[in-house]
Amino acid sequence: MSNAGCSSVLPAPCRQAGHRAPLPLPAAPQFVARFRSNRRLRVTCASAAGHVSRIPPTEARRVRSLAGSRHRPPPLTRIRSGTPRCAYVEKMLVAETASLLDVHRKDREARIRKQLRKVELPPSPYDTAWVAMVPLRGSPHTPCFPQCVEWILQNQHENGSWDINDFGSSANKNVLLSTLACVLALEKWNLGQEHIRKGLHFIGRHFSLVMDEEIAAPTGFNMIFPGMLSLAIGAGLQFPVRQTDIDGILHQWEMELKRQAGQKSYGREAYMAYVSEGLGNLLDWNEVMKFQRKNGSLFNSPSTTAAALVHNYDDKALDYLNMIVSKFGGAVPTVYPLNMHCKLSMVDSLEKIGISRHFSSEIEGILDMAYSFWLQRDEE
């Protein structure tokens, strides 16, 4: 079966890591039914041809072609629109499936099964930085999560940036956003002056990317980055950038704020809460907390939840951050929980690669669980 016949739970523009919005609940049963229907059809055709246990030749060629390529986890992107897709996990999954036909097939199948059972989310420097900025209650000059501050100090790249790619990465808007957040966190606690200097110079060298509208950007970047830039300037940080460039970005930000202020709708309120890291005291944080979830978070986002705590103390929000820091240590992911969404995304990838039949029992369990969550309208 060609890819055209394979359904995808995800819209094409949203297939990147770091998505924050949950899978729309009405989509769950359609995806489950569609996937099961496609898989039954493919197995029936394979049985008729006598190849139930083999990957069809066309799909085998696709898998072999992947085997010679190098697959590294991509930089974590912070795109928050649409349906989440764990690209970081999927890249590892594709790397494993690329060699399913070799002599270590059983070992590789076992590793994929492990990934299907337990999703491992990569750390997010951006979200870790915001969690690091939360002060200890009653002690505004002490970080509530010093382990996050320490992670920032220990994980800056030689080029001055912060990113999850251990090999360093080319600059992009996501890396600029993460680097600025880490610089702000260190400046807040008066730590790592050399780290701050290197981070500011990295941002300065690549500042032109901020103004380039043809370069892909995380949703809300044009609200969040200028707001954080304004916060950094207010803290006395100096960027090696022409003042006219800074003024231009801040002017566009102010114009967008005025445009948003002229809109009165629930959607506008949700969006402003969604990008609240860049708005600070411009927001009514009591209004923002209307979007708090049962688990205490805002949008299952450590960064947005942390930004709310910086401006408006809330026990449930603090409990959420305590929980994820206890679970992940000094570096938190860009969104949590995202377990079911990542699993559905991996099922979708296995379907497209053409080897889903090897993981029938695991996939059935995932689809049953997804349908159960949909029936319960569970936020997971």
Image (cartoon, grey):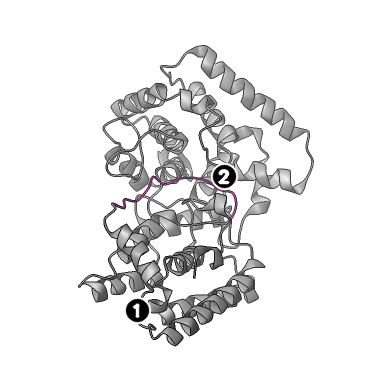
Is residue 41 at least partly visible in the picture? yes
Instruction: Report helix, strand or loop for mark 1.
Output: loop
Residue 136: where, in percent of width, then height?
45, 44
Q: Which residues are magenta?
A: 70-82
Q: Give the side of residue 291 with respect to residue 19, left or right.
A: right
| Mark 1 residue type | Arg
Earlier-in-chain disc, 1 versus 2: 1
Q: Residue at x 44, y 59 (%)?
A: 323
Residue 365: where, in percent of width, then height?
47, 80
Instruction: Report helix, strand or loop for mark 2.
Output: helix
Q: Residue at x 48, y 82 (%)?
A: 45
For the residues carrying marks 1 and 2, which lies nearer the camera in this image? 1
Tell me whether the residue at label 1 lies in contact with that at label 2, contact meaning CB atoms closer than 8 angstroms. Answer: no
Q: Which residue is mark 1?
A: 54
Q: Residue at x 30, y 73 (%)?
A: 109
Number of numbered discs present?
2
Does 81 appear above or below 119? above
Q: Nearer the viewer, residue 220 or 152?
A: 220
